[in-house]
Amino acid sequence: MYDVFLMIRRHKTTIFTDAKESTTVYDLKRIVEGILKRPPEEQRLYKDDVLLNDSQTLGNCGFTNQTARPQAPATVGLAFRLSDDSFEQLRMEPFSTPPELPDVMKPQDSGSTANEQAVQ
Amino acid sequence: MSDGEERACEGPDSMYVKLISSDDHEFIVKREHALVSGTIKAMLSGPGQIAENETNEIKFREIPSHVLSNVCEYFTYKAQHTNSSTEVPDFPVSPEISMELIIAANFLDC
């Protein structure tokens, strides 16, 4: 069974975690509960803008080890219950924008390789 | 890891730690992944009463969210592929962030 790698995002919070393709949406909510202290009943999880069902597995929702890799995790949206029966709008604050590339670094016709990894 | 009881960010035994970028984005990652960074490891496990030790939160005043998110992805990637015998895919780095990523990696010692 494959691992899927996820970023669970709400507003300015991003949780990096992994799970199996067979993990259910409800199980994922339990993981979020452990971190953010909100029970599953007060959470809604989304893939893009589609609300996910508690009983579905992540694999069934479209999170596979091809689409959810460690170096490029898939994004799961999270919204909390406000009060009574209403939930907040799904909202994820975008990350900051990188500065514009200086001209010398802009890719030429043949394209430059982005091999600037600082791997020790 | 599916016993359903994931510990939160409290206490020295917590499973997760929180890394905060310069623009106040909060990134929650598994503690063992964050320890890929020598700097974070030292901050979290050094002797004495370092504040980060108690709250398991570290604020990076110079690292913006678009860089810190890549750093977190790298942690997962490294932890996954270390000691792995399967072929390791490249870690993608877009040119726009490569400079800042090098600086962050240097600071974080990873």
Image: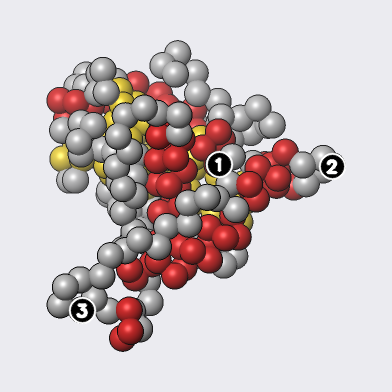
Q: Is residue A80 left or right of residue B13?
A: left
> Can the viewer see residue A52 in this picture?
no
| Cα–Cα span, label 1 and label 2 | 21 Å
| Disc number lying in front (3 or 1) | 3
Which residue is located at x 78 percent, y 46 percent? B50
Q: Position of residue B98 (x, y in %)?
A: 40, 66
Which one is nearer the viewer's eye here, A89 or B9?
B9
Q: Residue furthest bottom?
A: A103
According to the picture, the residue beneath numbered tag 3 turns out to be A108
Q: Position of residue A65 (x, y in %)?
A: 23, 32
Q: Residue furthest right?
A: B48
Q: Residue furthest top?
A: B3
| Disc number lying in front (1 or 2) | 1
According to the picture, the residue beneath numbered tag 2 turns out to be B48
The circle drawn on residue B36 is 1
Badge 1 and badge 2 both on one subunit:
yes
Q: Does label 1 or label 2 sit earlier along the sequence?
A: 1
Which one is nearer the viewer's eye here, A22 or A27?
A22
Q: Is residue A54 left or right of residue A6?
A: left
Q: Which corner quadrant of the image does residue A55 belong to?
A: top left
Q: Which corner quadrant of the image does residue B92 belong to?
A: bottom left
Q: Are marks 3 and 2 in contact (CB under 8 Å)?
A: no
Q: Position of residue B99 (x, y in %)?
A: 44, 70
